[in-house]
Amino acid sequence: MRTKAVKKNKINVVTLGCSKNVYDSEVLMGQLKANDKDVVHEDENDEGNIVVINTCGFIGTAKEESVNTILHYVNKKENGEVDRVYVTGCLSERYKPDLEKEIPNVDEFFGTHDLPNLLKVLDADYKHELVGERLTTTPRHYAYLKIAEGCDRPCSFCAIPLMRGGHVSTKIEDLVTEASKLAKKGIKELILIAQDLTYYGLDIYKKRALADLLKELAKIDGIEWIRLHYAFPTGFPLDVLEVMRTEPKVCNYLDIPLQHINTEMLKSMKRGTTSEKTRKLIEQFRSAVPDMAIRTTLIVGYPGESEEKFQEMKQWVQESRFERLGAFAYSHEENTSAYELEDDVPEDVKQRRVSELMDVQSQISFELNQEKVGQTFKCIFDRKDGNYFVGRTEFDSPDVDNEVLVDATEHYIKVGEFIDIKIDSAGDFDLYGAPVSSD
């Protein structure tokens, strides 16, 4: 058993879930660093004697991962390998009383808006003046920029408003300040995130102001790519498309979860749209920005989804030919309005439908990738992995989309740099190519 050392505490921050949680962990770490604390992110050697776990509570699998991670570090505490374990984030916000009862060996649980209190138990002061100061955990050339917190949408299947509260936009000038600081540190790509980018500005400017924000961010020296994640289809501000079309820094890329295409399903999901409106919106996207890459996510197995309704969605996916698509089995979440419905699609049927959709998407992705062979794309390179340098085009977001692979035994590429790559072959989800000769 490890004897407690007199040496300075080291705080290990462990992040689970989405990019919003990554951002929150970076803000926490920035505050700790400003308080002269020794802080690391997901330390490989588990040397931190104080552990802060930033949890996800979105759906069943994410909750299970969060609970297992908490139990892992509680076990380390019981074995004397760590001194203190704190839990924060969405799971903690949603289930704090239950967690306190079930896992009493956690030193304290904090919610999503408890940063000052969490810092206090870590013997640190919350510094209000640190606008935009974060300890980024992403590669040095890209960073997430959270432009709003919370969500006002009533989606029946989603528990996020329970955990994150209502929508609160961050002022444009504060975001420009934060982005400028990131640019000075070498960040070249900003990935804008929120529960709902579409709603940005309505609460503070009384209008949808995403286009205005993009124009201001595009003025920042050093920022070369600006990418949009998590837009909502209802009320999408079409002036954003004009900015995307005319401003080279704004990537021709949009992550917009559509969830379903059957009107009855959309109504039950409380999405505020119909099949006809959804199809028309995609047509508007394609018309305004013809080479836009659209990433979407779909839910299968929602209560009442008959085989006929699923086949309607499958046919729509085949017709729409989305560049990027993810499909997820419906998770029956307590305290959501859909929880009152019968979870009537068996789990094996849900998984079969996910597989069917992803098989369709895999073929679409393969065909779209074949069209890229012989073309040259500006790519940014994120890392070296084995015998390949791994990069992305403007049509790809890190971790979730296609990658561009360059043979490291034949070419050298500096990670974090933009390089023109000519594509010479392609698979379902990967492109292979070589740097374009400068002579």
Image: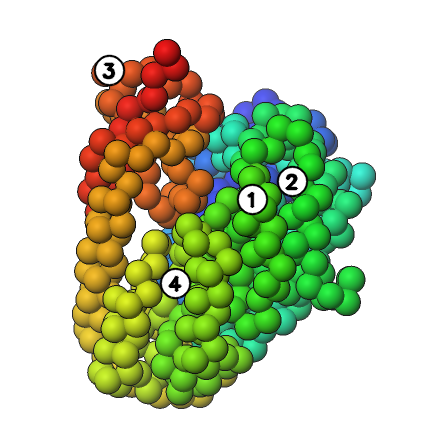
Is residue 81 rendered to the left or right of residue 213?
left
Mark earlier in primary sequence (2, 3) = 2
Mark closer to the observer (4, 3): 3
**Circle number at residue 297:** 4
Q: Which residue is painted at 66% across and 29% down in the image?
A: 221
Mark closer to the observer (2, 3): 2
Q: Position of residue 213 (x, y in %)?
A: 69, 50
Q: Considering the numbered disc 3 on the image, is that residue within a helix, a strand or a loop?
A: loop
Q: What's the amino acid at mark 4?
A: Thr
Q: Which residue is painted at 29% across and 16% down in the image?
A: 411
Mark earlier in primary sequence (1, 3) = 1
Q: Marks 2 and 1: in contact by CB < 8 Å?
A: yes
Q: Considering the numbered disc 2 on the image, is that residue within a helix, a strand or a loop?
A: loop
Mark closer to the observer (4, 2): 2
Q: Position of residue 437 (x, y in %)?
A: 34, 16
**How far apart in space, not on screen, are marks 1 and 3 (Cα)?**
32 Å
Q: Position of residue 421 (x, y in %)?
A: 34, 28
Q: Position of residue 388 (x, y in %)?
A: 27, 25
Q: Which residue is mark 3?
A: 410
Q: Quadrant of residue 145?
A: top right
Q: What's the amino acid at mark 2?
A: Ala
Q: Considering the numbered disc 1 on the image, is that residue within a helix, a strand or a loop?
A: strand
Q: Which residue is mark 2?
A: 218
Q: Which residue is mark 1?
A: 250
Classed neighbour count for the residue bearing mark 4: other residues with Cα under 10 Å, few (<14), some (14–19), many (≥20): some
Mark earlier in primary sequence (4, 3) = 4
Mark earlier in primary sequence (1, 4) = 1
Mark closer to the observer (1, 4): 1
**How far apart in space, not on screen, are marks 4 and 3 (Cα)?**
37 Å
164 and 47: which is toward the camera:
164
Mark earlier in primary sequence (4, 2) = 2
